[in-house]
Image (cartoon, rainbow, N blue to C red):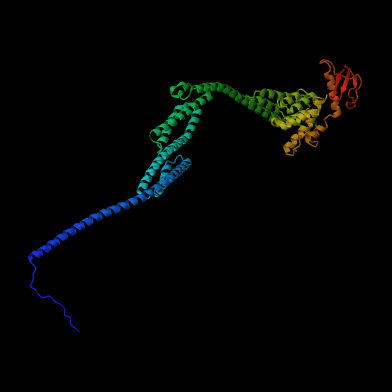
Amino acid sequence: MAIIRPFEAPELGLRPSEIGVESTAAVGRRVGAFANQLAQETERYGERAGRQFGSAIRDAGQVVTDTITHHQVSQGAATFAELSSTITNDWNTIVGNADPNDPSVAAKFRQTALEPALDKWKQGFATEAGQKWAEAHVEHLRSHMFEKTDADMASLAKQAASNNLHQTLNQLSNTVYNDPSSLKFALDTLGSSAGGIVDSSPNLKGTVRASVKMELTEKGREQIVKSAALGYISKTGQMPPWVSDPDYSKYINGIELKQFQKAAEAQTKTNFLQDKAIEDYRLKQADRAAHAAANKNFSDNVSVDPETGKVIINPNYFQGALDIAKKNPDAPSASTIARTYLDWGEHQQRQRAEPVVSDQTVKSDLLTRLGDADNPTTEMQILDWAARDKLSSRDTTLLREMVKASGPELMRDPLVHAAIGGAEERVGMRLMADGHERYANFLQQFWPEYLRQKRAGTLEPNALDLKDPNSLISKSLKTWEPTPQERLRAALLKNLQSLEPQTGAPVEPKVALPPIDKLEDGKVYETARGKLKWDAKRGVFVTQ
């Protein structure tokens, strides 16, 4: 195989000159300068490209930010309106139920409700523009609520001042009404009280404080002045002398002044009537005391012998009767009471051996008027008739007991009045010839038993029922009530008598008329007045 040897260049002895070296260096410098220029251009290009790329990024980010801001602001506008409404309603509820005397209500609300709500609402905004928008709205709502709560607290403080002054004002008004001479003291007290209450309120400031103080003071002064005027009029019946004083007259207008003048005139009459009523009451009380003393004297010193029925009088009775007048000098009837009791006592002492028989007319009148509300029977009347020998001792005692037991209160009972009035008609008191006697006998039987049962508590509920045949009043009436035939005959006779002249004698039939139930309708009968026809339907005779 052939062997290939490498070629090696021989050493020729050649060396580069100095000019060639310099030339190479120059080329290097030129290449370096170009490279440096290229680098600078590349850097400038990079900067321009970077700026263009960064601007594009920023533009794209701003679009996103603006979109987010718009979305949050749009939603925030609606939620802000809702927040404003909620905050306002919450405050109105709180202030509406707040204690007027608590000045810290607004501060507590702003601290615990308003600020937390505003902070929470602001948290919903992420962009810088959205936060600025939200902050502006928050500040606006905060400023509005501060103004509103301050104004409401001022109103609440005014209410508290008015309420706190109200009680003081009422007391001062009552004071001057009862003592008009204390008017100046009351007005001075009102001024210092109103000033202290208003000035000590932290929620009343500046002109509001001065306005409230003036308003409360002036209204209070007006009330006190008018109350003092009315009190003076009430006591004297005259206008107060200071009513024309400029310090006080400005609180009373012309219409009120005329009203006060009329009130003074009316009060003068009222005072007169009141004084008279008081005097009448005093005299009546004195008379009652005199009557009570007479009753006690009678009860202590008069008795009835159960065997003989005669009245026994203790000698002390007469001294007791005299003492009625001596010990009750203010009682108008004291002397009359004493005289009546003395007359009765003296009459009993000189009474004849034969017993006194009651006059039925007198007895009937006294019994009838037991239930008379206008002219009731009195013990004085009973004793007076007894002293004239018109009442027996038994009837005198019985009537006195009935008067004392029934009393004025029982007489005013409408049920009792209605029952007694019905009983009058049932016994024919104004129809029958003996009607008064029948009525007196009924009362003498009914009243003692009615009063006895009433005192004992055994009175039946139907005791006064005239329709119930088993009632106490119906049973008492049974004996004295005329029959239908007796009632018809009495009505017939009364009708006949009405046809006679007032001075003539009662009409009597020429012949005996048949019983009422036998009279024939339309038949003519002979009477002293001539022929009369019987009208059965009307129950009367008519002239022919």
| 302 displayed left or right of 529 | left
- Residue 439 % position (x, y): 79, 28
**Above or below: residue 392 compared with residue 33:** above
- Residue 394 % position (x, y): 78, 29
- Which picture quadrant has residue 419? top right
Residue ranking furthest to the right: 511
| 74 displayed left or right of 529 | left
- Quadrant, the N terminus: bottom left
| 255 displayed left or right of 22 | right
Q: Residue at x 60, y 25 (%)?
A: 278
The answer to whether residue 419 of the structure is visible from this angle is yes
Residue ranking furthest to the bottom: 1
- Which picture quadrant has residue 515? top right
Residues 194 and 22: in front is: 22
Residue ranking furthest to the front: 2
Q: Residue at x 39, y 33 (%)?
A: 207
- Quadrant, the C terminus: top right
- Residue 306 % position (x, y): 78, 33
User: Count the marks: how many?
Assistant: 0
- Residue 386 % position (x, y): 76, 25
**Above or below: residue 224 compared with residue 73:** above
**Above or below: residue 170 compared with residue 521:** below
Residues 421 and 153: in front is: 153
The answer to whether residue 354 of the structure is visible from this angle is no
